[in-house]
Image (cartoon, rainbow, N blue to C red):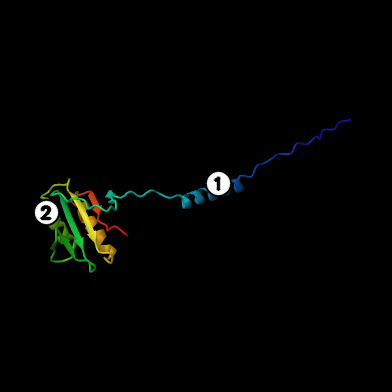
Amino acid sequence: MNLKPDREDNVELNLTPLIDVVFLLLIFFMVSTTFEKQAKLKIQLPDSTAQAEVQNDKSIVIGIDAKGHYFINDRQLVNTSLDTLKTALKQVSSGKTDMLVILRADAKTPHQSVVTAMDAASQLGLVKLSIATLQSQ
């Protein structure tokens, strides 16, 4: 008595569903991956303390009022263009890139004006940037 069957079944493995699952996983990981964005400017936010820091001669103060007008060391610029701001910063810094730039913006200043000031400083190599704040009471 022979209990083994005489015929052998050819077993075939269908890879199509496996490939579909691998592609779906690949698409999932591509869509859900986030990439790190690094900024050119390294911003050093000041501590809000009761004592005011003494301003040294090696700093440039960029003031921006509520309408977006620029002031460099309390002198108003003729217009709000990027080229004018870069020219004024270049004259004040005398080509030195190690000077501290203090950004004083009004609370209602348009965001674009602040970004333009930061961009102008970055393009001139002025990467030491501090944003002035008031102490909240």
Q: Which mark is residue 22?
A: 1
Assess disc 1: are there few (<14), some (14-19) or many (≥20) residues with their C-alpha within 10 Å of its C-alpha: few
What's under tag 2, amino acid-wise? Val
Q: Which mark is residue 92?
A: 2
Q: Earlier in the sequence, mark 1 or mark 2?
A: 1
* Coordinates of residue 57 in the picture (x, y in percent): 13, 49
Q: Where, quadrant-wise, is the C terminus in this rendering?
A: bottom left
Assess disc 2: are there few (<14), some (14-19) or many (≥20) residues with their C-alpha within 10 Å of its C-alpha: some
Instruction: Please name which of the two marks, 1 or 2, marks the residue nearer to the observer.
Output: 2
Q: Secondary structure at mark 1?
A: helix
* Coordinates of residue 107 in the picture (x, y in percent): 28, 64
* Coordinates of residue 120 in the picture (x, y in percent): 20, 56
Q: Looking at this view, is 78 or 52 the one in front?
A: 52
Q: In this rendering, would 14 be left or right of 9?
A: left
> Can I make out residue 40 in this image?
no
Disc 1 to disc 2: CB gap under 8 Å: no
Q: Looking at this view, is 95 or 103 the one in front?
A: 103
Residue at the (16%, 53%) spot, across then down: 60
Q: Is residue 71 above or below residue 129?
A: below
Residue at the (50%, 51%) spot, across then down: 27
* Quarter of the view holding residue 2: top right
What's under tag 1, amino acid-wise? Val
Residue furthest to the top in view is 1
Residue furthest to the bottom in view is 67
Q: CA distance from mark 1 to mark 2?
A: 59 Å
Residue at the (48%, 51%) spot, across then down: 32
> Can I make out residue 71 in this image?
yes
* Quarter of the view holding residue 74: bottom left
Residue at the (89%, 30%) spot, across then down: 1
